[in-house]
């Protein structure tokens, strides 16, 4: 394997690890939103609703950062002729509706969306980690 190709693999591995770290931060932020969402559902009131939305904003920021890191990872993978489709996004409409229509049904819908996003995020992280392992094996000649 030539030096250029080894460098490209190393860059893809570094980008993948950055994406995993960003996904971990997004997961942590979503877990925080989920916790406050549960508190809000069971009578937490206005303050818990505002805290939940603050955590959802944090999660949105971390998800956007993870999306950028995933795009960088995808670009690096293309340099080593590996491709993947990874996409995460949070629906801002749900956040808006929940803020102005605070009731148990809407809270349950938001909790369901957060749960779905967490599952998708974890699946995405597993795909990235698997791809990193494949790159490391390929680099070591395996």
Image: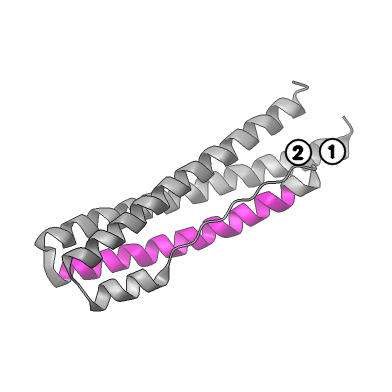
In the image, 62 versus 74, the foreground residue is 74
Q: Are marks 2 and 1 in contact (CB under 8 Å)?
A: yes
Asked which secondary structure carries label 2, the reply is: helix
Whether residue 72 appears in magenta in the rendering, the answer is: yes
Quadrant holding the C terminus:
top right
Whether residue 111 appears in magenta in the rendering, the answer is: no
Along the horizontal axis of the image, is 111 left or right of 124?
Answer: left
Residue at the image position 24 percent from the left and 53 percent from the top? 35
Question: Range of the magenta residues?
Answer: 47-76
- Marks 2 and 1 sit apart, C-alpha to C-alpha, by 6 Å
The quadrant holding residue 69 is bottom right
Q: Position of residue 135 (x, y in %)?
A: 70, 33
The vertical placement of 79 against 87, above or below, is above
Quadrant holding the N terminus:
top right
Asked which secondary structure carries label 1, the reply is: helix
Q: Position of residue 91 (x, y in %)?
A: 43, 67
Residue at the image position 30 percent from the left and 75 percent from the top? 97
The quadrant holding residue 81 is top right
């Amino acid at each position: 394997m030539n030096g250029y190709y080894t460098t490209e693999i190393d860059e893809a591995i570094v980008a993948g690890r950055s994406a995993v770290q960003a996904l971990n931060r997004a997961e942590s932020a979503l877990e925080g939103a989920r916790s406050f969402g549960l508190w809000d559902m069971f009578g937490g009131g206005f303050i818990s609703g505002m805290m939940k939305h603050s955590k959802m904003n944090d999660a949105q920021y971390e998800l956007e950062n993870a999306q950028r890191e995933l795009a960088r990872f995808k670009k690096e993978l293309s340099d080593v002729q590996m491709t993947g489709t990874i996409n995460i996004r949070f629906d801002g409409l749900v956040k808006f509706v929940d803020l102005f229509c605070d009731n148990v049904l809407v809270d349950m819908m938001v909790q369901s969306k957060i749960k779905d996003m967490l599952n998708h995020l974890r699946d995405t992280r597993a795909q990235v980690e698997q791809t990193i392992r494949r790159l490391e094996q390929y680099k070591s000649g395996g």
